[in-house]
Image: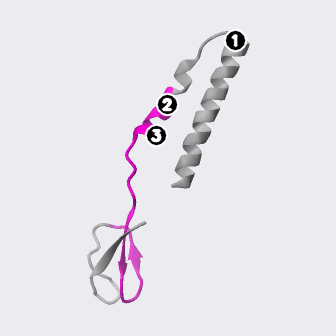
Amino acid sequence: MRADAALIAGAFVGSIALTVVLIVVLHIPFVLLFLPIIPFLLRPRRRPTVKRCASCGWQTDDPRHEYCPCDGSALVTDTI
């Protein structure tokens, strides 16, 4: 989650800095450099769902698993 925020912040700062440099040096407004990061800002945040076995601690993020392959007990759903 923090890596996504750092990536978005870095892309935003880099895009703004590059736009300012191009405006000052070339006297051309490159406002379209900001547009590629807009989808990252507007996408919904989906938290990964992890299922784990209460008995042995086995974990998976595969939604197809309902039972532990080690001991056959039902998996408990956790959100990170």
Amino acid at circle 1: Leu
In this view of the protein, which residue sits in the foreground, 20 or 69? 20
Residue 40: numbered disc: 3
In this view of the protein, which residue sits in the foreground, 36 or 2? 2
Q: Is residue 28 above or below residue 43?
A: above
Apparent side of residue 59 relative to residue 65 in the rendered image (left or right): right
Q: Which residue is mark 1?
A: 26
Q: Give the image location of residue 58, x and y in percent.
A: 41, 81
Q: Give the image location of residue 46, x and y in percent.
A: 38, 54
Amino acid at circle 2: Pro
Residue 50: numbered disc: none
Q: Is residue 57 above or below residue 1?
A: below
- Cβ–Cβ below 8 Å for labels 1 and 3? no
Apparent side of residue 24 relative to residue 63 in the rendered image (left or right): right
Secondary element at tag 2: helix
Check the picture and name the quadrant holding the C terminus: bottom left
Magenta span of residues: 35-62
Q: Give the image location of residue 50, x and y in percent.
A: 38, 69
Whether 59 is among the magenta residues is yes
> Which colouring convention does the figure follow?
one colour
Q: Is residue 9 above or below residue 54?
A: above
Residue 36: numbered disc: 2
Determine the CA span between mark 2 and mark 1: 21 Å
